[in-house]
Image (tube, rainbow, N blue to C red):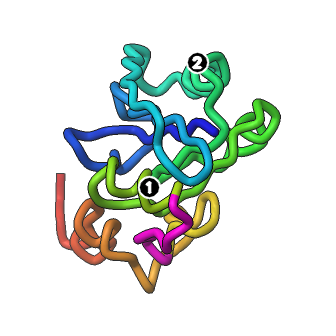
Amino acid sequence: MKVAVPLLGSDVAPRFGEASHFIIAESFNGEVTAWDTLALDRIGDWVFRLSELELVGVNVALCCGFNRFYWPLAIEKGIRVITGATGDATKLVQAFVHGEKLPLLPCCASPGRHRFQIRNRCQYQQAKVPRRAEFAGRKE
């Protein structure tokens, strides 16, 4: 099995489509047997990214955010996507391969959930997106 994780430094990138590098881990019988890095220069091109991951034989993609419109394409290419992943990418892959519980953000457990969650914002959203009330008093 091959596992891919989009990188931001050594951590999981917040969005699958915005990472320029992926870590690829190959596993056998619950142990990581090989590590590799894949550089993808076409940021935001989801079809290209999923096609490249399919070409290198990736079966699972661990990421934080994944655009729900490309979920069917990932399934078609044989890539199981697990969203909500956070933290150090290598530790995350090792935990996944060993069958341990992954540190997932609760609001990222299903595709497209960030977009529709307005009142009960998750920690990731609170840090990145200002609330609507902050825009109400502004004049541009």
Q: Quadrant of residue 47?
A: top right
The image position of residue 96, as x and y in percent, is 51, 59
Residue drawn at (51%, 61%) of the image: 98
Q: Please tell me which residue is depicted at 47% across the width and 63% down the height of the picture.
A: 84
Q: Is residue 135 left or right of residue 82?
A: left
Q: In the rendered structure, which amino acid carries the disc numbered 1?
A: Cys
Separation of disc 1 and disc 2 at Cα? Answer: 19 Å
Which residue, given by chain and number where applicable, does mark 2 sit on? 52
Q: Residues within 10 Å of mark 1 (few under 14, many from 20)?
A: many
Residue 118, given in percent of the width and then of the height, sits at 47, 77
Of pointers 1 and 2, the one earlier in the residue sequence:
2
Q: Is residue 30 above or below residue 23?
A: below
Up-down: is 11 above or below 19?
below
Q: Residue furthest right?
A: 76
Q: Which residues are magenta?
A: 98-106
In the image, is 4 to the left or to the right of 28?
left
Q: Residue visible at 62% across and 27% down? A: 50
| Residue located beneath label 1 in the image | 64
Picture quarter containing residue 95? bottom left
Q: Nearer the viewer, residue 45 or 96?
A: 96
83 or 114: nearer the eye? 83
Q: Nearer the viewer, mark 1 or mark 2?
A: 2
Depicted 94 relative to depicted 26: above or below: below
